[in-house]
Image: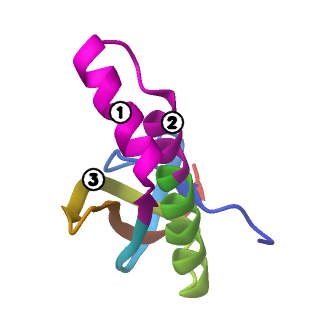
């Protein structure tokens, strides 16, 4: 990316002025959680403690989804995305478990004040 797109969950950026609202942008990521991760997560649930593999999957999903959101915003001429919302869901059934993440925000052009 030639110019880094700024991302924020806030409705404004300190030190910047929104000069144009371009469009709503979103990215969706689905990550499969394999049977071993699910099994060890079950053990952690039973015995207590943190599940590092699940935490890593959540972190990877967030990073990937935000990178895609940044790329989509840049493609339509934005240099920032404000008001970002991250929604996580789990889809399971048939012995499979999937992590679903949707990131949405408003693509804007900003200038420094």
Mark 1 and mark 2: Cα distance apart in space: 8 Å
Residue 84: horizontal and vertical position, in percent? 35, 55
Q: Mark 3 points at which residue?
A: 88
Is residue 38 inside the magenta stretch? yes
Do labels 1 and 2 touch, CB within 8 Å? yes
Q: In this view, does 39 lie to the left or right of 16?
A: left
Residue positioned 60% across, 75% down in the render = 71
Q: Mark 1 points at which residue?
A: 41
**Residue 39 visible from this viewpoint:** yes
**Residue positioned 36% across, 39% down in the render:** 39
Q: Which residue lies furthest to the left in this view?
A: 93
From this viewpoint, which residue is outermost toward the right? 2
Where is residue 73? Give x, y as percent.
52, 76
Q: How far apart are marks 3 and 2 (CA)?
A: 16 Å
The structure residue drawn at horizontal position 46% and vertical position 34%, both measured from the top left corner, is 55
Query: Of the residues tagged 3 and 1, which is closer to the observer?
Result: 1
Q: Is residue 22 left or right of residue 2?
A: left
Compare marks 3 and 2 and give the one earlier in the sequence. Answer: 2
User: Label 2's element?
Assistant: helix
Q: Residue 61 carries which label?
A: none
| Residue 13 visible in the snapshot | no
């Amino acid at each position: 990316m030639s110019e880094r797109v700024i991302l924020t969950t806030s409705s404004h950026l300190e030190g910047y002025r929104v000069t144009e609202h371009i469009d709503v942008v979103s990215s969706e990521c689905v990550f499969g959680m394999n049977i071993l991760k699910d099994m060890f997560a079950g053990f952690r649930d039973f015995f207590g403690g943190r599940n590092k593999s699940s935490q890593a999957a959540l972190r990877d999903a967030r990073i990937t989804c935000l990178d895609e959101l940044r790329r989509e915003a840049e493609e339509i001429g934005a240099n920032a995305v404000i008001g970002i919302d991250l929604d996580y869901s789990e889809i399971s059934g048939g012995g499979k478990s999937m992590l679903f993440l949707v990131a949405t925000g408003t693509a804007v052009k900003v200038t420094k004040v």
